Image: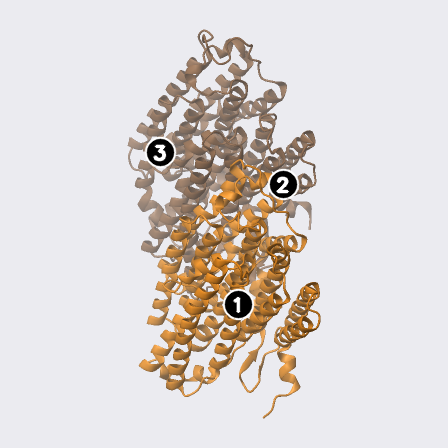
Chain colours: A brown, B orange
Amino acid sequence: MSFHDYALTITIFFPLLGVLVLFFTPKNSVRSIKLTGFVSTLIVFILSLYLFFGFESDNPSFQFQQQVTWISGLNIGYTIGIDGMALLLIVLTAFLTPLALLGTWNSVEHRLKEYTMMVLLLELGMVGVFAALDLFLFYMFWEAMLIPMYFIIGIWGGQDRVYAAIKFFLYTLFGSLLMLVAILALGYFASTLPEGEFTTNLATLYAVAQHIPLNLQLWMFAAFALSFAIKVPLFPLHTWLPDAHVQAPTAGSVILAGVLLKMGTYGFLRFCLPLFPEASLRLTPVLCVLAVVGIIYGALVAMVQTDIKKLVAYSSVSHLGFVVLGIFAMTEEGIQGAIIQMVNHGLSTGALFLLVGMIYDRTHTRTISDFGGVAKLMPVYATFFLVISLSSIGLPGLNGFVGEFLVLLGAFKSAVLGTYAYAAIAGIGVILSAVYLLWMYQRVMLGPVREGAVYAGHKLSDITKREMVALGFIVIFVVWIGVYPGTFLKKSAWTAKTVVTLMENVQRGFQPRYAEWPLKVPNENK
Amino acid sequence: MSINITDFVASAPLMTVTLTGVILILVEAARKSRVQVSFVLTLFGLLIASVLAIVNYSNEQTVFFGMVRQGWYANFLNLVFLAAALLTVLLSKPYLERAGVHRGEYYILILFATVGMMLMASANDLIVVFLGIELMSLCLYVLAGFLRTKEKSNESALKYFLLGAFATGFLLYGIALVYGAAGTTNLEIIEAQVPDLSSQWMFLVGVGLLLTAFAFKVAAVPFHMWAPDVYEGAPTTVTAFMSTGAKAAAFATLILVFHQVFRFTESNVNDLIAVIAAASMIVGNVLAIAQSNIKRMLAYSSIAHAGYMLSGIAAGNNEGQTGILFYLVAYTLMNVGAFGIAGLMENEEDKNLQLDDYTGLSQQKPFLAALMAIFMFSLAGIPPFAGFFGKYYVFLSAVKADMTWLAVVGVLTSLVSVYYYLRIVVLMYFKEGNGDVAAKPAFPALIAVTCSALLLLQFGIFPSVIVNAVQKIL
């Protein structure tokens, strides 16, 4: 009974306290609403730092575990715990949420109280998704999180927000509902084994998984993968993303790009690979081809966008392709790269959306051709924009390089892929990302101030101190990961190692293949 | 053999509601003008009955010459019916006052309908099943036409009565054939004979006719035609009661007869029920999309929900039973809530029943809009509300019975349903209204809808309260 035991639970549910306080805050005291929202998310970040520093990198097992019987009849437990990957993603979530609020301090005026509540509930759901070690619990968080995001897009979004919100909701729900059936089938499969019973406990299911026949594995893999692929989004299931991203308010886009998309890739690593290894090996070519197509396609489509926000949205499709490629390369480098690339993408794309939001607040346009010479008017802004763009491109010394390099290295080395083709084609994606981002940068920031532009005539004010703080924090981590990624890679090393070992055992036919699996079956429910 | 006092003690909840009804008749006769007294007495009677149901909860007994079986099953469902009745009564007072027909008969009819439902859940004999269904239905026929000056209300009552009478015919014929095959109407004795009976055509035809009658009562496809018209025309609060209490009662009997007595597993009967379930989900959800009137939309959605619950019957395992019982609780709360809000929105001229009338509600009545959003998300089966766990459980039972296809149909049609449930949320939250929502929510009604919403959240996050109750522990 110490704080340490409950740290994860407190981190997940702390936003509820903020929601409660907000509930009793009068809706016209704007300042206190903003402060409550910001302070709550900040405290969540501090709590997540406690997790970060309390996490033992050289301990392969899941940490901060807690298990409480929840629905005894169905063996559903409130089971939570984190490994390195979950830790990094929780810290990322907790880091981006306050910054998203800070960076868009004055952008939302209408129904501010509900807005802040929704952001807090969203944070609760996201942290919960990464911490859950019970499929039922995971699914609860996974779906419940749709509600606040739906409202954020639908109420505070742009012109076509209703369409985008519904599309986002239906699209993601479609995938997750089939995953629900697969979860049920998985739990039921566990009950058909000798002395087995229906369960959604992940540790038990990992142990059960090796008995699943291949054809059943393929079906379940397909159901899970569909749900995750929609979330990532993997080509050709990405069409909800540009709409949702473009229509969402800035903070929504930051969180959507920064965290929500990672839930898909996280799902692949946490569930698809370890639960259905044979099926994963079988279907690797399919997913990798889709990933590579996504990398190139996303980049090409990004290149021809006229709207900056849409360009950034399509760049996400391209970048997330790298993550999926890294995961399915099934080498330590690839998976490490994928995990660090999830964080990178969260930081740089989150920052890009913040930057786009900042200029939109000032000019009320996002069309590239409306701009020109912004750097002359907003030099600080332009500098930040350049640094973040370069990080997104993957300039050595900044974070993007580390992730992409590791992913490509993993893909080259990969025995599972068996060919250099994937890595080679994905490499072209890196070049293309330089093309679309720098070209956009050139058109927007450089050159003469455009005649007749929306903002021509009145002086564009450079970013405020508040915005500078928000971006500054992101840049610190962009450089940190770029220069010394060890701090973070160290945390996720075991995650990558265990998955790779498992896959190798499966390929060689070793039994028991889960011998060194870090998540142990609970002995008795406490 | 005689009736003794223990029979009455064991059936205390049933007796309390009956007694309240009888007292109300006397009160009505004596002091015609004081409707408030009837309202308070009704609430009181229902509350006492609920307390007695909890006290009596796991007191298993067969009483009244083996005609009535009391115990956890009857009491669990009694609580569901009583909750539906209580919420309806709270919603009804302001509604009827506005419509100018706030009269004591209303409460008497509600009480006796509840008695009918309670009899259905505690039946141990097909004759009692019949008595219960008839008592409930007759009261509901009258209630549906309670706004007697309104054409639609009359139409609703007449349609319900004619088609209901037809279904009663099926029920009676079914009972007769089962009696012909088994030589008894006592469910326990039939249960013992089922293995021998299930190859007899007379028995199977009887079962088919019973299934038809129940499918009519739960409004399952293809016996669903009456539901939209009846639900639309009846006073909104009666619709709330009909769509929840009556449906729950029909399911109670369905579980009793099909799950506990006939116990078909992996037989053609189960496949037949599975097909009915799938058809209800598809037809209900697809047709609901096209509706522009909220009551009709909810009527079609209730057809779909009957489909979800029928999957539990089709599965025929214990998970199915628990799943349906949980689902009934959730469904009662969310549907009473949704119809309750529709009733609050409605004004004297039958207006504000179109979906478009909900435009911009979140700005004029933020609290009502938030509650409505909760009901819609719960009906759509989105966690963390109780509707989700209900679906989870019935789909689980379907997967367990090797009917994964049924679960897949279930989730895909849920996706369809999300579209129309969310349309209300879209209108309430994402669109600007013209600001003429006049309704001033009355206090008792507000309590009812708020309680429903809170309980949905409570049971959604901590479903074990209900799950344990179904496993006979309270």
Q: Nearer the viewer, mark 2 or mark 1?
A: 1
* Residue holding disc 1: B142
Corner quadrant of residue B143: bottom right
| Callout 1: SS | helix
Q: Nearer the viewer, mark 3 or mark 2?
A: 2
- Give whichever of A311, B381 is nearer the camera: B381
| Callout 2: SS | helix
Read off the chain for label 2.
Answer: A
Tell me where residue A309 appears, x and y as whole percent. 45, 25
Tell me where residue A474 appears, x and y as whole percent. 55, 25
Image quarter where the C terminus of chain A lies is bottom right
Amino acid carrying label 2: it is Pro
Residue B395 at least partly seen: no
Read off the chain for label 1.
Answer: B
* Residue holding disc 2: A15
User: Mark 3 vs mark 1: same chain?
Assistant: no
Looking at the image, which residue is at 40% across and 28% down? A314
* Residue holding disc 3: A411
Is A211 rendered above or below residue B367? below
- Residue that protrudes farthest toward the front in the picture: B149
Is A278 rendered above or below residue B319? above
Is A514 rendered above or below residue B266? above
